Image (cartoon, rainbow, N blue to C red):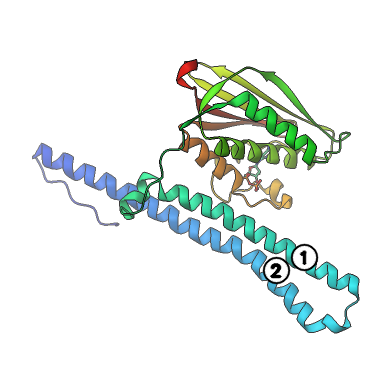
C-alpha cells in the first residue's frame, strides 16, 4: 500500500487517472491503519476485565475453603461486575464493527458483504421520543434530587427522518454521560434537554453543568476509546460518543459539542427534517 505510481510528464488524462489512483491508495492506507489501531485498542480494553475475572476466579479456586462467606461473595461480585463490563464492551464493539461493514471504505475490502439499508426510513417525532425517554429515566434512575436535577427546557414539535432505536440510543448515551460527568463533579447539578427546529434540521440538545471538557480534549471525544484524563475514574468504555457519532451519521445527521471546563457541556444532535416539515 505504501507504493505510489509516479506521474509521467505531459499526458494530462494519464496524470489525472494516476492522481485518482494514488488518492484511493492513500484513503485505503489510512482506513487500514485506523482498523489496525481499533483492533489493538479493542484487544487492550477487553484484556483488562478478562485479566481481572481470571484473577478473582483463581483467588477463589485457591482459597475458597478458607474464606469467610462475606469475602467469597465480594470476590464473586467483583468477577460478575467484570463480566458485565466485558459484555457491554463486546456489544459496543459489535455495533461499531457492523457500522464499519456498511460504510464505503470497508465495502472496497469486503465487496460481497450484504450492506444494510441506510437507517432513515421512519418519521420520528423528536419531542415525543425525548420526553418519553426522560419520563422513563426519571422512573428508573433514583437520582438524588438534592444533587442532580433533570429538567425539560424549550420543546417544539419536530419531525425528523430516522429510526427510533438509533435515536433513542443516541439520546441515552448523551444523557448517561451528562449524569455521569455532572454527578462526578460533587456539586448540585442540572441537566436540561430541549428540542428545536433550525432551517432544514431538527435538533435536540443535552446540556449539563458538569465537569466540562478541556479544549485540548474536545476535538477527540468522538474518537473510539478516547477518554479525557479527568473522566478515567468513571469506568466508561470510551465508546459511547463514537457510537452516537456513527449512528447520527447513519441517519444523515451529525452531532456537535460545546463545553467550558468546570462549567458544563452541551451536546447537540442535528437530524434531517421529515419532508412534511421542510
Ligand atoms: P466514556 O465511556 O468514557 O464516557 P464516551 O465516548 O461516552 O466515553 O465519552 C468520551 C469522553 O468524552 C469521556 O471519557 C469524557 O472525557 C468526555 N465526555 C463525554 N461526555 C461528557 C460530558 N457530558 N461532560 C464532560 N465530559 C464528557
Classify the position of the N terminus by image quarter. Answer: bottom left
57 vs 98, left or right, is: right
Q: Is residue 210 visible?
A: no
Identified at 61% across, 56% down, the residue is: 89
Q: Is residue 136 above or below residue 63?
A: above
Identified at 17% across, 42% down, the residue is: 17
Say the numbered circle drawn on residue 52: 2
221 vs 113, left or right, is: right
Residue indicated by mark 1: 78
229 vs 98, left or right, is: right
Question: Which mark is first along the chain, 2 or 1?
Answer: 2
Where residue 86 sits: x, y (%)? 64, 61
* Quadrant of the picture in which ligand 1 is shown: top right
Q: Secondary structure at mark 2?
A: helix
Q: Please name whichever residue, 32 or 174, is drawn nearer the observer in this view of the structure.
A: 174
Quick check: is the Cβ at mark 1 less than 8 Å away from ligand 1? no
Amino acid at each position: 500500500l505504501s507504493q505510489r505510481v509516479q506521474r509521467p510528464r505531459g499526458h494530462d488524462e494519464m496524470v489525472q487517472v494516476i492522481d485518482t489512483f494514488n488518492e484511493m491508495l492513500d484513503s485505503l492506507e489510512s482506513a487500514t491503519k485506523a482498523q489496525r489501531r481499533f483492533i489493538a485498542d479493542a484487544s487492550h480494553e477487553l484484556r483488562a476485565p478478562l485479566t481481572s475475572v481470571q484473577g478473582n476466579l483463581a483467588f477463589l479456586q485457591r482459597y475458597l475453603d478458607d474464606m469467610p462467606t462475606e469475602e467469597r461473595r465480594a470476590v464473586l461480585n467483583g468477577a460478575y461486575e467484570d463480566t458485565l463490563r466485558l459484555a457491554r464492551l463486546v456489544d459496543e464493539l459489535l455495533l461499531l464493527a457492523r457500522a464499519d461493514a456498511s460504510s464505503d471504505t470497508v465495502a472496497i475490502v469486503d465487496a460481497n458483504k450484504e450492506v444494510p439499508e441506510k437507517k432513515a426510513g421512519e418519521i420520528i417525532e423528536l419531542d415525543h421520543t425525548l420526553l418519553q425517554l426522560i419520563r422513563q429515566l426519571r422512573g428508573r434512575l433514583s437520582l438524588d434530587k438534592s444533587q442532580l436535577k433533570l429538567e425539560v427546557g424549550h420543546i417544539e414539535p419536530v419531525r425528523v427522518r430516522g429510526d427510533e432505536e438509533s435515536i433513542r440510543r443516541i439520546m441515552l448515551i448523551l444523557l448517561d454521560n451528562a449524569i455521569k460527568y455532572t454527578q462526578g463533579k460533587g456539586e448540585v447539578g442540572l441537566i436540561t434537554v430541549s428540542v428545536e427546529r433550525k432551517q432544514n434540521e431538527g435538533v435536540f440538545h443535552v446540556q449539563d453543568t458538569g465537569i466540562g471538557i478541556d479544549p485540548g480534549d474536545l476535538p477527540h471525544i468522538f474518537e473510539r476509546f478516547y477518554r479525557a484524563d479527568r473522566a478515567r475514574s468513571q469506568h466508561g468504555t470510551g465508546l459511547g460518543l463514537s457510537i452516537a457519532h456513527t449512528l447520527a451519521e447513519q441517519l444523515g445527521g451529525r452531532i456537535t459539542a460545546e463545553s467550558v471546563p468546570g462549567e458544563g457541556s452541551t451536546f447537540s444532535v442535528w437530524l434531517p427534517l421529515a419532508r412534511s416539515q421542510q
